[in-house]
Image: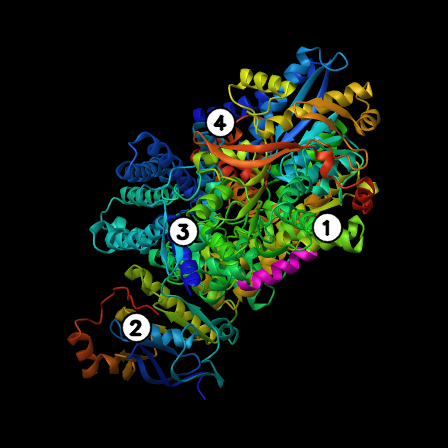
Amino acid sequence: MGFYLAQFLTGLASASSLFLVASGLSIIFGVTRIVNFAHGSFFMLGAYLAYTFVNILPHGVLGFWGAIIVASLLVGVIGVFLEITLFRRIYKAPELFQLVATFGVVLVIQDLALWIWGAEDLFGPRAPGLGGAVRILGEPIPQYDLLLIVLGPAVLLAVWLLFNKTRWGTLVRAATQDREMVSALGVNQSWLFTSVFFVGSTLAGLGGAIQLPREAANLLMDLNVIGEAFVVVVIGGMGSVPGAFLASVLIGELNAFGILIFPEITLVLAFLVMAVVLVVRPWGLLGKPDAVLRGADGPPEQPLKPFTATSKYLVWALAAALLATPAIADEFVLVLLSDILIFTLFAVSLHFIMGPGGLVSFGHAAYFGLGAYGAALAVKYLGVDMISGLVVAPIAAGLGALVFGWFCVRLSGVYLAMLTLAAAQITWSVAFQWQDVTGGDDGILGIWPAEWASEKMAYYYLTLALVGASVYVIRRIVYAPFGYALRAGRDSQLRVEAIGINLKSQQWMAFVITGIFAGIAGGLYVYSKGSIFPDELHIARSVDGLIMVLLGGIQSLIGPIVGAVSFTMLEDLVTRLDYWRIIFGGVILFIVVIAPEGLAGFARKILPESLTGKKNEGVQI
Amino acid sequence: MSLLDVTNLCKSFGGVRAVNDVNFSLEKGEMLALIGPNGAGKTTCFNMLNGQLKADRGSVSFQGQELLGMNPRDIWRLGIGRTFQITATFASMTVRENVQMALISHHRKVFSLWNRATNSYAQEANSLLQQVGMEHQADRACGVLAYGDLKRLELAIALAHGPQLLLMDEPTAGMAPQERITLMELVASIAKSSNVSVLFTEHDMDVVFAHSDRLMVLNRGEIIATGTADEIRSNEVVKEVYLGGGSTFDTGEKEKTSA
Amino acid sequence: MISRRGLFTRTLLGGLIAVVASTAHMANAAETIKIGEINSYTRLPAFTEPYRKGWELAVEQINKKGGVLGKQLEVISRDDAGKPGNAVKIAEELVAKEKVALLAGTFFSHIGLAVTDFAKQKKVLFIASEPLSDAIVWSKGNDYTFRLRPSTYMQSAMLAKEAAKLPAKRWATVAPNYAYGKDAVKAFKSVLKELKPDVEFVEEQWPALFKIDAGATVRALEAAKPEGIFNVTFGGDLAKLVREGSIRGLFEGREVASLLTGEPEYLDPLKAEAPEGWIVTGYPRDFIKDATHQTYVDAYKAKFDELPKTGSLVGYNTMLTIAAAIEKAGSTDRDKMLAAMKGLTFDSPSGKVTYRPVDHQSTMGAWVGRTAVKDGKGIMVDWFYADGADYLPSAEKTKALRASN
């Protein structure tokens, strides 16, 4: 009995830690609609700053808690600084674009933390007076755990009071529901958002600082916590702080008891729970249906236009240049170009579902990885040749998309995005865990091209042909009735249903199409690298794709190509330098600020009409 | 048998009877107006007819086919076109493409992956636009249209599959008075020339009296009067409802009833 | 707008110029031997920074003495950002564009394996310096890949041999849920079972890497009432496990055998809370009195103003390996270097190291001892140097392990 109680309390303590991070994220999303990847970085900064202040301030109870509070508030100030200098400039950008900015912030903070605090983990002291354990039913329970168990609900109560018993809270809640109305009421919306950022970041900082007695401050904290924090927020319902609490407790307890039965489950438990919750309750436990990712603030997308004569020449010139490259360039240029082409297809396929489809996918790596694994497994177990491998790749990915898509199209907005993420994470965990079949994280080796394609030049041409054909086909589909119907459904769900279109089947089919093309990219990738590891299914790969699409400009068909090319080249360029992450992040932030409509949108603004076609009326940014 | 027969239609929201035992029928080529003060249940009634809202009880029969339980897209396929109180169009397409979209769907070509959508049914789309006087704006982006033009575009979309019945929820909401009259004249003339029946709700009594063959007055979910414009104008109960309820016949405010 | 664009162009140009400049610099130094080096410098700086310093020191010393075969060593070092795909791309560049004589490096096992397979495909010599995976020399081993650091199997076997001397019979294991953890537990179990058939394993915990829920894991281990615990967690996970475990009394009256925990990379951050009495593999760098080692430590301290860590020694030995191999081969011809690598012996600060011809694994060992806390920091006591050769399977057994390839 005592054992189970102890495990229960342990679960509650973990839940409190999780809740502190998640609540801030939920608040920020609820009001500003920013999917803030940098929230994990705030968490990490909280832990590091707390470490620093604990050492500066006098030792003892006051010094310790003083350090925690000062660190949290300082993180809040950093959040405010970022909101004012960065996010405020891009609230009006097309949906999700802010995500790119937060990605840049993550990179910058990673290098800053390394630079300021060094590479070594920093193990803080135990909390004064709470360093030991008390016995409950004979079981030792850390005193600090008991404190956390109390702290979680206390913060929940404080946040609840703040939101429900203050004028500020009333305004914030109003803003959550209707942003226009609040500005119509004469409330200065930008300061409201700033203050929300302060509260959210402070909570993230507190979450990190409070971890100091439990874990060493380290440079991986940011990315380790962010995934789970998002999961908690989504399970609870975006923007619902009590929901986040409930979800934290759910995850904390399932984890505490789950590891008794099936220890390996911790790898994927949170994402499994999220998938189940979303399938049963499409808006999370306590969420409301309106919490969707809306592009309402951005300008409407412009009608599709065929290439102008000049751009047609450019496309042919580009094709000619790509065909001629092997004659003049060295082998590595071909390797790099092949990479760029593969990621271009990956980004274009993701854009197909996100742009015309209006369905945000946070888990596109699933199809890339399924394609790669499909080919690799076919080689490993069936000994198929390269051509068959490249045929298996899109089939495997398409089948995956058929299954995941069926569940995903039932949801919308950020919930849909998170279900795609869950699907990708579950796929990842299968590849990771099922060592006997997939080789686990040791991957599958020896997937090299057939003899005739083993020269770099031959493989480059193969890649060029497949990617070129795929991009062309995707473009045709976008211009075809199917693509139009998809965009129609994105523009007005009400109207498509009222003209007899079954939007769900349309979207489901779109998932399959996007999966197939991502699968082709995955197949090409595995043969170009010779091996495949679960990394290619992981969040990081999905995020790369997202950044490419958004950076390029989601409202343009050229966008994902521009995004993929610039992202891949920039990454190749900067990783040669020390502290490249801060440079990379800095460049991304710079682009975000000068081109909030993405690179392609930016180009459209400054290029002549002979390239972009007739400028549209009345569209201003 | 009439074109549309509605019998004993009921809907409650948490104990409040929004629509209570509504019965009416609509003949081929007839323009029938559904009026009533705010919160009378007009939009609720409408949304049950077009499949967006589930009815508690009753029957809606279109040419003998029961509509209750069907979803909006299947009802549309039977030949019922719709316009919305707040226009619903495709902002990222041109005016013509909006109409083409409806035509593509009508011809069941939405899964076509290769041909260019802009080349599909362009002629038909042009003539529909001509019908509503939008042919000169065919290549403009829908996102930049004036509201009155959007309403006309919606009408063209609703007519795309050659419907026998048009359901128009507040067709003139949000328009200037002169525009309202022009639009309703357009609707009336199309209805006459194509022998399409129209069921519409409306706030503007000038519009209602000028363009309906018959009127129904809904109050607190019940039909309290049916008849021609003159009969309704002189009906004491109707006067009581409108005047006593603080509303007048010519109030033009946008109704904010939600579905 | 114009000026902003100008600034943007300049930023990009600046980056380009930096790259071009560095390439140009490389092109100038014609009389060098180029070595391609890849590691996860940004992903795990805590482990790869000491490693980088180690090989930098070695290169400096070798070049000061006149280089190898009269040529200076030139290391082209790149960051793979922790992604195997990147590592392969960089390897392609180093081979195709930089024309390096050989490849070296990697820390993560899967990245090591990706480059191992690349080396086989492109027929290039690859010195896998840091990755621990047994597969690199055994199941996925190939003619072109050699591995320096004592492997998962070797280090687990070192601990298992010590564990077999203890009275503890009921063992529990806790390891990160990925190949390294799995391999380590498997190796520890099999060696311990072999040496002491009556042991039983009563509990296994597999926390996700760097995401351990320490409280719950500790409770689950405690519930099984083991007499001994074999730990494979490291880094942030280890810190959490140690603190939770000591608060909850998990380690009281129990033996703990813990892989790599004695390495300064893992022991130093724990400071005064370093566990006491654990049997660990590691590197008691400040207590090794051997003269060669002392010279090495002094040089390292002089250059970097800090004590070397395990990674430093691995990095240092990597360059010693390369220099010795090229010296022995008499050229940078691939086949001659490959022949030289088989059975190559060189003197390292940790003693003589030989690359076994049978599986290309070096016999570099590790130090085995118990942990203790002194002056507020964790140290190793009662340690001895376990020569890797003593913990590797025999030649016949090894052949069987590699046979599948």
The relative height of residue A181 versus residue C294 in the rendered view (above or below) is below
Dot 2 corresponds to which residue? B208
Q: Quadrant of residue A85?
A: top left
Q: Residue at x 62, y 62 (%)?
A: A402
Q: Are marks 2 and 1 in contact (CB under 8 Å)?
A: no
Q: Residue at x 64, y 45 (%)?
A: C165
Q: Chain of mark 4?
A: C
For the question of whether residue B93 can be seen, the reply is: no
Q: Quadrant of residue B223?
A: bottom left
Q: Residue at x 32, y 41 (%)?
A: A128
Instruction: Estimate the x, y position of residue A275 in percent, counting from the top left.
Output: 51, 61
For the residues beneath circles 3 and 4, the answer to whether they share a chain is: no
- State the separation of the CA atoms marked 2 and 4: 61 Å
Q: Chain of mark 2?
A: B
Instruction: Estimate the x, y position of residue A174 in percent, counting from the top left.
Output: 28, 54
Q: Residue at x 48, y 24 (%)?
A: C6
Three-letter code, disc 2? Val
Dot 1 corresponds to which residue? A376
Foreground disc of the pair 2, 1: 1
Three-letter code, disc 3? Leu
- State the separation of the CA atoms marked 2 and 3: 60 Å
Instruction: Estimate the x, y position of residue C316 in percent, counting from the top left.
Output: 64, 24
Instruction: Estimate the x, y position of residue A252 in percent, counting from the top left.
Output: 43, 57
Task: Give C320 or B74, whichever is nearer the viewer.
Answer: C320
Q: Is residue A75 magenta?
A: no
Q: Residue C8 bears which disc, if any?
A: 4
- For label 4, the SS is helix
Q: Residue A18 bears which disc, if any?
A: 3
